[in-house]
Amino acid sequence: MDKLKQKFAEKAAPMAAEIKTIIKEHGDVVLGDITIDKVYGGMKSMIGMVTETSKLDAVEGIRFRGYNITELREKLPKAKINGKEPLPEGIFYLMLIGELPTPEQVYELSDEWAKRSAVPQHVYNMLDSLPKNVHPMTQFSMAILALRTESVFSASYDKGLNKKDYWDATYEDAMNLIARLPRIAAYIYRRTYFNDKPAEPDPTLDWAANFAHMLGFSNNDFKRLMRLYLTIHADHEGGNVSAHATHLVGSALSDVYYSFSAAMNGLAGPLHGLANQEVVKWILQLREELGGGLPTKKQIEDYVYKTLAQGKVIPGYGHAVLRQTDPRFTAQQEFVKRYIGQDDLCDIVNLVYEVVPPILEATGKVKNPWPNVDAHSGVLLIHYGMTEYDFYTVLFGVSRALGVLAQLIWDRALSHPIERPGSVTTEWIKNKIASVKGTAKA
Ligand code: HAX
């Protein structure tokens, strides 16, 4: 058993016992109210599941096992040479084990993922059979499904896997899939836009830097950006579409490949991860309409009103939980200050940040007028030469694997059961209103 798995096993057994006691002794404690507006309103803020890896605060933003983004940038181990940004291996370790890793523990994880990263040829053959105009997220999700041939969980289950060993096989699948995702993503990038193959992996590099290298980027600051990018997109507690999809599909004992492919299908929606490509499209179109250059605030204002009048959302703004500027947006602004300096598109992002919130606030209906993570990420990639914006959500997906798969291992270790919330009809709700309020049907 590898050291990380051993450490997880030591944590998981007492936690599983503790949860059994909590349910037995305190299972009747009420956690919140279910109201009609929440049931119709996408279950926002309704507590319905347990996620150990991270917790979102509406104002303060995300905390991973108690640490916010600023603390993580400081405390998580960095690359051996010129490391200034956290290594995503570290946030995976933190989410899985619940403790900050040492640099050695993180470097061991880099090595472990490098060892597990070989992708079977049939996955590449399947990708090669697809037309180049298949969206990169569709290719990504299909490649993850094609990799299912490698599932340790499914093979073991077929042979009669004991329930107590589910987590072990899920750990193997999660580690293997995380190790392979950069190779698959780089393959999709190179075949789709350049009609060639990714660079051979460099096993001396960490997971994120190696990904940058396979994508075809040698710039050190781009590698730093990838380390930060893959760290800050990793998790956002359990209820967002990609995390919840992983948990839900996984609850049927579907393996890691099925569960994570489902997550990627959700991430590919424009209200979720695809917003990162939509933001760049929206900004480039603004520039094109104005004939290039830096727009004035008035011009951005007009463009925002026009977008709203067309019945569209302003991409990169708003959030189902957050009620403040997303700290992941701020971390990217800081990255610009530290490594980039002046950049026209980054300047436009900052101008949009000044213009959009008061306009959205004035609509009286948008609950959060502030930017989310997707409002910034694309222009950073363009700065380093990655202009193919319909690839951006794949980068997000590679990162999201860290959080949702760490949690899926916990789901198995804690024996979370199949998920099956109740649903009602509107007729049922009308009858309920009548019985509670004593009125005739609404
Ligand atoms: N622009 C225009 N209108 C917006 C808006 C925006 N950015 N954000 C919310 N609204 C509108 C909603 O469409 C809704 O309008 P209707 O009542 O006419 O249907 C109203 O304001 C209330 O919505 P809300 O309660 O504030 O927001 P939700 O919790 O329902 O939705 C979303 C949250 C993130 C989906 C929403 O803010 C949105 O569509 N934003 C733009 C897309 C985006 O950036 N998505 C990425 C979110 C972060 C993420 O998951 N990244 O992966």
Image (cartoon, rainbow, N blue to C red):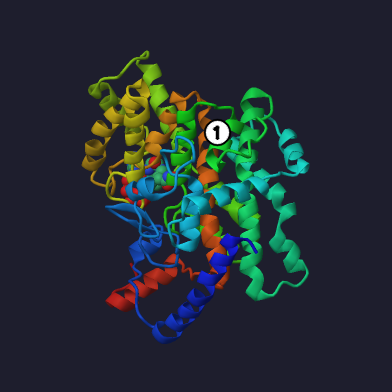
Give the image location of residue 62, x and y in percent. Answer: 36, 53
Residue drawn at 43 percent across, 71 percent down: 428
Query: Residue furthest toward the bottom?
Result: 25
Q: Is residue 63 visible?
A: yes
Name the secondary structure under disc 1: helix
The C terminus - image quarter: bottom left
Most foreground residue, 353 or 385 = 385
Give the image location of residue 349, x and y in percent. Answer: 33, 29
Residue drawn at 40 percent across, 61 percent down: 43
Q: Which residue is mark 1?
A: 212
Mark 1 Cα-neighbour bin, 10 Å: few <14, some 14–19, many ≥20: many
Number of numbered markers: 1
Identity of the amino acid at label 1?
Ala
User: Taking the image as four quarters, which one is ligand 1 found in?
Assistant: top left
Query: Residue furthest toward the top?
Result: 291
From the viewer's perspective, tell me whether residue 235 is left or right of residue 182: left
Q: Does mark 1's beta carbon lie closer than 8 Å to ligand 1?
A: no
Q: Is residue 272 visible?
A: no
Residue 328 vs 303, above or below: the answer is below
Give the image location of residue 183, x and y in percent. Answer: 64, 39
Q: Quadrant of residue 163?
A: bottom right
Residue drawn at 29 percent across, 19 percent down: 295
From the viewer's perspective, tell me whether residue 43 is left or right of residue 164: left
Most foreground residue, 304 or 391 = 391
Residue drawn at 31 percent across, 30 percent down: 337
